[in-house]
Image: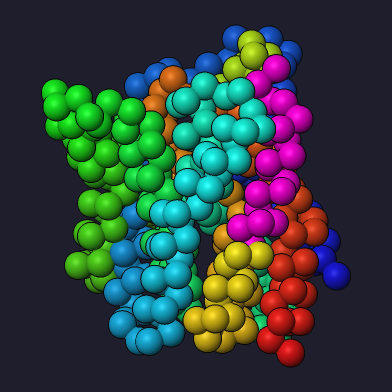
Amino acid sequence: MPDLSASLSLLTSPAILFFFIGALAALARSDLAVPEPVAKGLSLYLMLCIGFKGGVEARSAGLNGDFLTAAALGITFSAVMPLAAVFILRRTTRLDRPTLCALAATYGSVSVVTFAAGQQHLDSVGLTPGGYMAAVLALMETPAILTALILLNGAGWREPGRRRTILREVFVGAATVMLLGSFVVGLISGEAGLARLDVFVGPLFQGALCFFLLDIGLTAARRLMEGGRKMSVGVIGFAVGFPLLSAAIALGLSRLAGLDLGDAALLTILAGSASYIAVPAAMRLAAPQADPGVFVTASLAITFPFNLIAGIALYTAAAMWLWS
């Protein structure tokens, strides 16, 4: 059964509540606004923290076989699933190209909070995953963003003058450099580096996340009011159905790869999640024309609650059944 107390605790966390405060303020037509330079600075800061802490976790995990197998599955899954998402979305929605690619990135990447909830639920049923799964989480955040940027910019690949621009946008754009660069810094500096930046990437991160999600709530609700027709039945169905498809594929691959039950269950939970921190932060910089009223709302208002209330328990039960 779902851990309803854990679900309620997560749904009432400050960061999530600030998202809804921002959305309600926008719906009430408040003049509350976050200046664009501040919003951009918050995006860069959050990506720095996410990448850096992921690098530290990867170094701490070492290069044991279980970690390498889970990491390889996670990276491949994150890079490939946006392709499947685009294939489905093109046939079920009428989204513009930037928003479609951002939505694909959202459902190829993963949710940190869903990871925490899943880990808690697995511990409660006696399926404790390896500590290196936190590094797998970090490794799964970025490939989907890179794939989405390639899809977004790839239309002009055959034009010789566009190739350098496309490669630059994908590999040395602000979002990519900050995520991958901070990951490498964390990987090199390890726990010693984390000790020096503990307050910066720890307690301050939570406050910045609240501010960031307040702004995302404002932006998402205002975009939704401006173009609510984009949040179609197709998008809503995708927000529930695609995580179930992703989780099923990840579960099967985990079984074939021989992962331990706890690791497989947590990887499946990650596959069934959707990003509402890393992808919005990256897309604000790399694809500002993408509509957060669609991709953020789908992730945070539909997929996230679904996973907390039912999805995590469902994925765990499926893993236990398949491994029995």
Left or right relative to 58: residue 119: right
| Residue 3 on image: x %, y % | 80, 66
Left or right relative to 252: residue 149: left
Residue under the point 39% across and 71% down: 72
Residue under the point 34% across and 71% down: 58
Residue under the point 66% across and 32% down: 92
Left or right relative to 138: residue 256: right
Residue furthest front in the image: 158
| Residue 101 on image: x %, y % | 47, 34
Left or right relative to 297: residue 43: left
- Relative to 83, residue 271 above or below: below
Residue 186 location, quadrant? bottom left
| Viewer-proximal residue among 67 and 241 | 241
| Viewer-proximal residue among 289 and 36 | 289
Specify the principal SS of the magenta part. Answer: helix
Specify the color scheme: rainbow
Per the rendered image, the range of residues in magenta is 229-247
Residue 32 location, quadrant? top right
Q: Quadrant of the C terminus?
A: bottom right
| Residue 296 on image: x %, y % | 59, 34
Residue furthest bottom in the image: 324
- Relative to 225, residue 263 above or below: below
| Residue 224 on image: x %, y % | 65, 19
Residue 238 in magenta? yes
Residue 262 location, quadrant? bottom right
| Viewer-proximal residue among 180 and 9 | 180
Q: Quadrant of the N terminus?
A: bottom right
In this view of the protein, can residue 31 be seen by the observer? yes
Residue furthest right in the image: 1
In this view of the protein, can residue 216 be seen by the observer? no
